[in-house]
Image: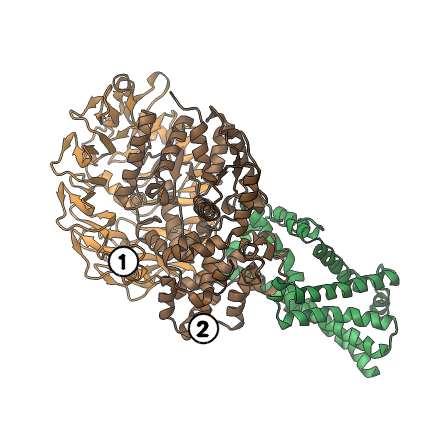
Chain colours: A orange, B green, C brown
Amino acid sequence: MAWQKVYNGVAEGEIIMTDISGWDWDSGKKLISDISDWKKIYHWVEEPYVSSDGEKIAAVIKLPDDEVFTMCENGVAWENAFDRVWYPRFSPDGRLTAFISDTGEWALAVDGETAEDKYDFAWDTRFSNDGKNIVYMAQKEGKYFAVVNDVPWEKVFLNMTGLAVSNDGKRAAASVQTVAFKEADIVKFQEGCYSAVIDGVVWNNNFVNVWDIVFSSDGKRVAAGVRTNLYDYTVAIDGVVWEKTFASVWDPKFCPNDGSVTAPVRSSGKWFLAKDGQIFWDRKFEQLWHHMYSKDGNKIAAIVAPQFGRWTIAVDGKIWGATFGDMVTDAVFSPDGSRVACLGKENEKWTVAVDGNQWDEYDMAWQPVFSPDGKNVAAKVEKNGRYTIVINGKPIKEDFAAVWDPVFSPDSDKILIKTIETGQNENKYFRRVMPVADITG
Amino acid sequence: MHDIYDFVSGPMVWVSLIIFAAGCIYRFISMALLAKEKDPFLYNYMSPYHALRSIFHWLTPFGSENMRKNPVFTIVAFSFHICVVIAPLFLFAHIILIKQSWNVSWWFISDTMADIMTLIVIASCVFFLIRRIVRPEVKFLTSASDYIILAMVAAPFITGFWTYHQFAGCRIMGIIHILSGEILLAAIPFTRLSHMIFFPISRGYIGSEFGAIRHAKDW
Amino acid sequence: MAESVKNAAAEITDAGIVGGAAKLTPEKIEKVINNVLKAEGGARLKTYVDICAHCGLCSEACHFYLSHDNDPKFSPAGKVKQTVWEIIKKKGRVDVEFIKRASEIASTECNLCRRCVMYCPFGIDIAYLLLTVRRICHKLGITPQYIQDTAHSHSATANQMWVKEDEWIDSLMWQEDEARAEIPDLRIPLEKEGADIFYSVIGPEPKFRAQLIYQAAVIMHVAGMNWTMPATPGWDNSDMCMFTGDFEMMARLKKIHFESAARLKVKKIVMGECGHAFRSVHDVGNRALSWKMPPIPVIHAIEFYYELIRDGKIKIAKKFDKPVTFHDPCNTVRGRGLHEMGRYVANATCETLIEMHPNREHNYCCGAGGGVINCGPPYKMSRIDGDKIKAEQLAAVKAKGAQTIIAPCHNCHGGLEDLIHHHKLDMNIKFLGDIIYETMEKPE
């Protein structure tokens, strides 16, 4: 589900890097839409979403004098309206999607067009990195399956969770219940009633639990954390488990270059990084999770607690000097793998940390974004209810009612900032491109 | 007889003192290391203010709900603990002996006071014994070791009283008195009497958890 | 009344215990016990066992002991004697029958309510000791069936009630629809990144008590909160794995919960009126992940309502006019000291508050907490018999005129309902949210 995506910094970076050269990178500020105008017509305008290129802003609206909803994009409502609209999301290539329902049936609408197949429920939209392929979960008559580009799996399941999608968006996998068991039948459950399904095809073996399914970067292989009984956790790759078992395991990852699989594992009360079933990093941690590979696969970074209650980043097993007491999240490698940025929280205040160096304190911060050349880092932050963009620790001069994640231009010289302003420009959504040097000085 | 007396009042004093002191230090350090190895997080939750707050409440007579519910026990337990520490430490006869041996001395209590305190300890032990036998909830928890420990605590006081008042066989009693005192001292670190060392820690820890983390009283 | 439980050892019928025991051998028991004691039995376990003076002063703290006419087998230390002491004394060489009974004692005859911790002069955490027994029983596979099933649900769905991903979202939309009939512009904002509040509930809310979500939505709406709920697993803050001793799964659940909130970039988590879930997020589950304190502040509904009323965000139109009494859930008083805030809310919303005795930190447990009610039908009567003292406490406050019990905890509702029904007390039970919803000013 989406909660896995947030830490998948490299993949997210790739989404943006695929086809951004065609975007409007000329400097300047452009008014895209004035939401006040929408509000005058519709009254009911929900929180807005913007496309990656910043050219579109959309929100769920309710038509006046009618109990029906639709999407409004740049001030223009979709032609059709529905009983319900939820989960609006822009695809990386700028198409607007949302789940819609009429008379209790659900479908995904893309730019206002609804597929013919309807379901009893549909949720969790995912996109390929280039945005061309769309995958989501659906349920019909109490059976569960994935829908890939409007084509539902033929095979359906008793229950299905934890959707995973390959980078190209052509393959989908999830944890599925393969054996029915009655209420409170603990014996049956412990015999193993779950497995992984990939494109409708289930692994040959069952497990007590299957979690954290992940595709290899080429989409050909699938790994998952599994529990083989109530006590033994390990990693299964294409259905084959590691020889060793552990007291617990977090999400496995494929190495992008050699195909090996790594996962944080718990043993003797401590956490280690294991590779292909063997302890890999030479030290233990109180906690170790959300490990990630640099794009070339040569480096691994992870969020770790080297001692109880203190959090930091470890790169290839070596920890930063800076640690945080509350939490560390949203770690991301620079494109060349030489730098790591993350969010750290201490005493209820957030900061951005890059290679262990901390920025100012904020009330909230979002995942940092590296420029393609890796020299600059930008992040969306919130302070006193106002939002702004900070680059290399320096905030831009203005602050805003709303801001979305910044995007660097392919040559790293410019930055795209998407904002809703206040004061005279209240409710106005602007797309602006600024030279990075103007901000960093 | 004299040799035995010399032995128990000489080297044995040293032995028991060393076992007591080294034992306390050993128990304390080994527990601290065990905590560091197995439950390292415990250290993160120690809050000196809340630890002392809790200890203070539980060292104040009737400072907790449970003490108020059991007034007789509370009075006995406090009297017992005060007397069991004060009487031997500030007994004139003990101080004289120490003065003779090491030439250090300190304030002492009157012999009458010491007598009263000794009797309080003995009476408390009798109370604890009876309570152990007649109260079902205490009896259920009781094993032979509880009686042995009670006897070990009572013995130096009974024999001390006996010796001081020169009852029949007081010379032998004197030796037993010294010996039982030494056994008691040496036993403290290695029996349930180690609550003497660990009370402030267990109390302080739970006081910290209740006070600093859970914002609640623990008394 | 005590008889029904006294001979329980001879009549264990629970499928989880019986089935699990059938696979055990003395060798396996010895090995597992010693593994747990060696790997996890640290300084606390050792110190607590070493220093306990066997004084029995904890006895009167326990509602099981009091309800069984002071039967020492039900005293806190008595339960430790029948389990932990024996296990340590025999170095794990205990037989199958012993361990079956130990499982039952630890899981169904102790609510882990921690009242006894307040009565022990040394502050021995007896609940921790019995939880260690549950941990051993988990490792031996002899946890009672129904709570084990709940732990299975947690592992497979990340919620307590086998609620599927779509059923959760659908329940929220259904409650939103219902609430819109009353307040047309009300929303239950799903997946709203950057909201101030992440509202999380326990599995039974969407499954059995969906109106609580409705009421919470109305309260959030009227108070003008910027809030959200996740459309992913992680919405359930409850945690029966904490109570079965499956600490690895407890850790996984807390990870999913806190990371859902972190993903949505909220400032705090507000949770519904549940006690054990608060314990799990506030100072148990988070520790299993190396978070010293919750990484995102968790505000229990009691505190949240207190703040809303104190700050005038919620105004009371007409106070609840029937006399009420306030039941302090163990996990919100001994777990977070929220008793005065609870009373503030009760006084602000009700005409008459009549105290039950004892109260606040010293209140008696409802009998359901600590996973005991989750052990299900086989243990219903032993649970009711084991909390006769609570029924007496309720009868006394009823005699003073209280008709309604406010209990800001799900398990307490379950436990108190059974007591009221069994003892024909004819009282009704409400959540603070019920009362606030009933009495607050709402838009016309």
> CB under 8 Å between callouts 1 and 2?
no
Q: Which quadrant of the rendered structure holds the C terminus of chain C?
A: top left
C141 with respect to A149 (left or right) = right
Identify the secondary structure beneath mark 2: loop
C90 with respect to C195 (left or right) = right
Give percent across and percent down for residue C219. 41, 30
Question: For the residue carrying disc 2, how many other residues have a C-alpha within 10 Å: few (<14), some (14-19), or many (20+)?
Answer: some
Q: Which of A94 and B209 lies nearest the eye of the viewer?
A: B209
Give percent across and percent down for residue C435. 45, 32
Give percent across and percent down for residue A187. 30, 62
Q: Is residue B48 above or below residue C9?
A: above
Amino acid on which the number 2 mark rests in the picture: Asp
> What subunit carries mark 2?
C
Query: Which residue is depicted at the point 76% across and 73% down?
Result: B13
Name the image quarter holding residue B4.
Answer: bottom right
Outermost residue toward the front in this view: C424
> What subunit carries mark 1?
A
Identify the secondary structure beneath mark 1: strand
The residue to which callout 2 is attached is: C95
Q: Which of C378 and A177 lies nearest the eye of the viewer?
A: C378
A272 with respect to A177 (left or right) = right
Name the image quarter holding residue A232.
Answer: bottom left
Q: Which of B73 and C321 lies nearest the eye of the viewer?
A: C321
